[in-house]
Amino acid sequence: MKEKLKIGIMGGTFNPIHHGHLVTAGEALNQFCLDKVIFIPSGDPPHKNSKEEKIAEHRYLMTVIATSSNKNFFVSRIEIDRKGKSYTVDTMRELKKLYGEDTDLFFITGADAILEILTWKKTEEIIGLCSFIAATRPGYNISKIQDLKARLFKKTGNNTQKIFVMEIPALAISSTDIRKRVKENRPIDYLVPEGVSNYILKHGLYK
Ligand code: NAP
């Protein structure tokens, strides 16, 4: 019998993508025996409006550059090309249609973003469509995820086993810090892949 396809979906702004994101995807691929990981840079994030988040095409291209050498990593324009706000529920529905209803989808993103899922559009439906992998930085207070599971259980009555936590020491790197460093003319070598660093310089991003 054919094994079920297991796909990791890396959701994020990736502004810019850095080594912490790449380590997260690699770790999820290995720990959850995924067939591949698809990075999906958000087009117009529902909870953000700042001008900085509008550089979607740059974020997409930097993600392509950063992932190009890994045979299991792919990048999708699904949210960049969709008009309006990027809602995860719409993305998961589209991916289920594309890969088949019996495909197991694992939505991988930062734990702080996952803590907010009760405020996302159609939370209950998303929980039915995919599992969640919450990537945490070292020292993260894991009880926040336990609280979320309890609140989710209260709301949906089940499915709280679908939230997994993965501590990623490399997530000490953050996009916010990288943008700040660029603005202050400090180096970002070794925090992002060389191609991404060159791209940021070439296009004068984050100045
Ligand atoms: P964010 O607030 O920019 O990020 C929250 C935290 O998670 C940050 O510390 C961030 O670090 C980290 N992070 C983000 N993506 C990550 C990843 N793939 N792996 C590891 N760490 C990650 O969150 P966001 O990027 O806007 O949203 C995350 C995902 O949730 C996106 O796919 C977004 O579309 C989705 N979302 C959906 C809804 C909805 O459907 N209503 C609402 C909100 C978010 P860095 O800054 O270093 O990346």
Image: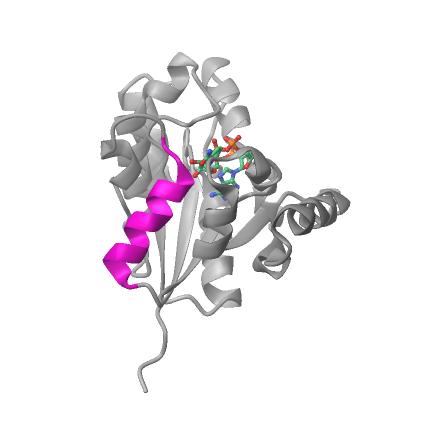
Is residue 1 rendered magenta in the image? no
Judging from the image, the colouring scheme is one colour
* Location of residue 3 in the rendering, given as x and y in whole percent from the top left corner: 35, 79
Residue lying at 27% horizontally and 33% vertically, measured from the top left: 80
Decide which of 68, 33 is in the foreground and name it. 33
Query: Which quadrant is home to the N terminus?
Result: bottom left
Relative horizontal placement of residue 173, taking residue 145 as reference (left or right): left
Looking at the picture, how far across and down is residue 71, in whole percent? 29, 61
Res. 40 image quadrant: top left
Question: Between residues 188 and 112, which one lies in front from this camera angle?
Answer: 112
Q: Indicate left or right for 187 with 159 as reference.
A: left
Query: In x, y percent, where is residue 74?
Result: 29, 52
Q: At 49% from the left edge and 26% from the top edge, which residue is drawn? A: 178
* Part of the protein shown in magenta: 86-100
Q: Dominant secondary structure of the magenta stretch?
A: helix
Q: Is residue 148 visible?
A: yes
Can residue 23 be spotted in the picture? no
Residue nearest the viewer, comparing 188 with 120? 120
> Which residue is at 57% across, 59% downward?
162
